Structures are given as structure tokens and as C-alpha cells.
Image: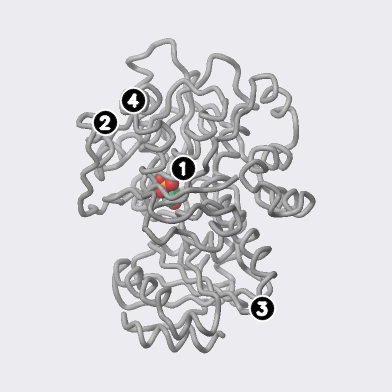
Amino acid sequence: MHYFSTNRRSPRADFRETVLQGQPDDNGLYFPETIAHFELDEIASLLKKPNAEIGFAVISPYVDGQIPESELFRICSETVDFEFPMVAITDRISTLELFHGPTLAFKDVGARFMSRCLCFFSQQRSQKTIVIAATSGDTGGAVANGFYGMNGIEVVILYPKGRVSLVQEQQLTTLGGNITAIELDGSFDDCQRIAKALLADTELKKKAFVTSANSINVARWLPQQFYYFFAMKEWDAPPPVVSVPSGNFGNVCAGLLANASGLPVELFIAACNANDVIPRYMGTGRVEPMASVATLSNAMDVGDPSNFVRVIEIFHNEFPELKKKLASVSVSDSETKDTMRQVFDSHGYVLDPHGAVGYKALSDHLGKNPTARGFFLETAHPVKFESVVHILGTFGSVPESVAELNKRQKQSIASEPDTEQVKEIVLSKI
Ligand SMILES: *Cc1c(COP(=O)(O)O)cnc(C)c1O
């Protein structure tokens, strides 16, 4: 299996190269040359197996022997080593809870798989590996946790001071060990700018293998297919409508890939907040990026969704085909709050703002399609967002791991938004 660049100006690469490189030089995204295919009876027998085996079967065609089978199986088992429950909220709407991993968000799945692949491939190199990531919240914690304790890998996370939630900050700053959190006195854009500069820094690149392990790496994207398969274990016919709270469109794109591989799904809804580039595209057929606007569902505040080119690739650039399988709508902050209140009052279920966007999009769709049923993805636990307690007066039941975080010491290094200052910190880790 090889991967080509969606911009088609970089050479094709195998799984190992795409994981190590992250993004092709022509700034496109890597995409597999062939999409795996499973017959319906194969899927039916697969769904009777444990999650680790499902993950292994789904990912194997894409790894294509570049990680030995026993090793890949171990990686898959560790990646999905927690619950993925489907919870009914009404008789037609369920939620697939993806927040039972170590950092309480779906990003744990991709981050755990990617970190283990990168660790495997970097063992074959003599240099130390430095992973640099900028985060506005959930990504940093998942990446830090995924790499925690791995030999030969140092992780440096840049986060904007005072702009991530308490739980998110604790998840980033209390690990220690090979994880260094840099609290930057600036914005998320500053964090990203400095991370980019460091990744391109020739002095650093001479001393270590420097990588971003970012969200467009195929090793983060592809394993997100797993839980769409897990969901179908608990689903009777007819195929569901699946609503996915979306920002960079990696998650919904993984669902579309699973569907293109044979997993039966009636329709995907990419549920967006006020950042409505793709809902607009559904009307016009043109992707017109814009500056992002801040919302309650801040992990989806994306004005130029980077994974959308992969969605287009799945449908071979055929807009009418794409529109048969994917709908996209925009949900406002006031609708998000109303949905959180209404679902809590009527069903006692605490939605986080991202899940609420997914719920609202699904329930509107089902209102117009009386025979359809579906589920939405709960992408993070409500306790990660302080707004939840302001809107509902409660976070619902809080996992024990959150109380554990409160007992731990914050360890972070304060820095001005200055590349040289951050570079000194990174150099001290090599
Ligand atoms: C990252 C994130 C999203 C958006 O996922 P994409 O793959 O970028 O579309 C949604 N909800 C939460 C809680 C997230 O952390």
C-alpha cells in the first residue's frame, strides 16, 4: 500500500515514510492509493470479535506489513483499551461515547495509535525523536498522554496561557517525565507559529529527528475508523444516520472511509458550529476558507478544515456523489445551549458543547425523516469544558481520573511568544 499526496506534486510514500514525514513536501495530505474493502458477511463476523481484533483487521491493509503482526496487534489493543459505549437518549437518538480514554476525548484513539507507530519506527533510528505540538486544548493532552514514558522520545507541547480549560491544562502539565509543557504568554496562533518555526529549524534538525505528530498524520486519521465499526456491534438494521461534531473534519472523514470500505451507514452529518465553511460548501460546491470565530464548542473553531481534501478524495471529486453520503449543518451557540438544557431537562443526559452540536444536527434531520434513526458522537467529556457547569449547573458524573489530576503538581515552563526562547528549552531536552 502506498500513499499519494492530494496535491500530486510529491512522490508516493509507504506507511513508514508517511508516518515519519507527517505531511508531504507539496503541502497536500497523504491519501491511500487503494481503499480497503470488506464484504457484508466479513463485517458481520468481524463485529463478533473483541475491539482489538476489529482494529487490527481494519488497519492492517494500510500498514501493509511494515509493522510485524504481533507488534501491530499489541498497538491496536493498547489503542482501544477502554470502553466505547453506545447510550440511548431517546428511542431514535443514541450517542457513541468516545470520552472514556485517558484524556477524556476521542483524540486519544488517534494519538495512542500514532505515538506507538512513531515509537516503533523511531527505534530503527539512532537520533533522539522530538515531538513538537501546539494545542488549543484537547490535542496536546492526548498527544502528551500517548507518548508518555516512551523511550527515546521527548515531547514539547506549546499551549496558550489562560486559554485552555483547567482539566485540559492539568492533563498537559502534570505528567512530567518525557513531556515538557510550555505555557506561552500569547495566543494559539503564536503557539502554532513557533511550532512551525521549530519544525523547520536546521540546527534542531541536525541534532534530533523533529516531528509534529500533528492531526493530519495518517496514523492519527486512519485508526479513527475503528469506533465506527465498534458502534455497529450494537446497531440493528436499518443503517444509521451518524452525526459527527466537526472542526478539522478528520473524524467524519474517517467515518466516510469506513463506509467506503463497506460499513453500512445511511448518511453522515458533519455538525459544525458558527464556523460554517463546509455547510456553505454544500450549497455552492466551493470551499471558501475564512478566519475562525470563537464559539462554545471551541475544539471545532476551524476556519479552514484541513482534512476536507481527503473527503473530496474519497468521492473522487464528484460533488453529487459526496452530497448523497454527507450533509453538513451549522449550529449556533444559542442553539447549542438550548439543546444542552433541553436534553438535560427531558432525558437527564449531560451533553458537552461539541456533543450538543452533534445532537441538534441529528435531531433536526430526524424530524424531517420520520423513519430514520441514528447516533451522534460524544467527542469529549463535559468536565473538560467549564461552560457546561455555567449552563447546566453540573458536569454530571465526573470520572475518578479528574480528582487524581487535582492531586498532581503542575509542571510547566513559562515563555514569551518568542521562537529563540522556546528553542533554548527544546535544545535542553536533546
Ligand atoms: C478535535 C475535536 C473535535 C473536532 O474533530 P475534527 O476531527 O477536527 O473534525 C470535536 N470535538 C472535540 C471535543 C474535539 O476535541
Secondary structure beneath label 1: helix
From the viewer's perspective, is 44 left or right of 312?
right
Q: In which quarter of the image is the C terminus?
A: bottom right
Residue 323 marker: 4
Identify the residue shown where x is 52% and y is 43%.
32
Read off the residue under disc 1: 251
Reply above or below: 404 against 176: above
Badge 2 vs badge 4, beta-carbon distance below 8 Å:
yes
Reply above or below: 216 against 273: below
Tell me the kind of residue under disc 3: Ser
From the viewer's perspective, is 210 left or right of 185?
right
Badge 2 vs badge 1, beta-carbon distance below 8 Å:
no
Check the image and name the residue furthest to the right: 70
Q: Where is residue 29 in the image (x, y as percent from the top left)?
A: 42, 51
Residue 282 marker: 2
**Ligand 1 has an atom within 8 Å of the beta carbon of the residue at disc 4:** no
Give the mark nearer the N terminus: 2 vs 3.
3
Identify the residue shown where x is 45% and y is 68%.
133
Q: How crowded is mark 1: few (under 14 residues within 10 Å), some or many (20 or more)?
A: many
Secondary structure beneath label 2: helix
Secondary structure beneath label 4: helix
Q: Residues within 10 Å of mark 2 (few under 14, many from 20)?
A: some
**Ligand 1 has an atom within 8 Å of the beta carbon of the residue at disc 1:** yes
Nearest the eye: 336 or 46: 46
Q: Where is residue 321 in the image (x, y as percent from the top left)?
A: 37, 24
Tell me the kind of residue under disc 4: Lys
Q: Where is residue 418 in the image (x, y as percent from the top left)?
A: 32, 83
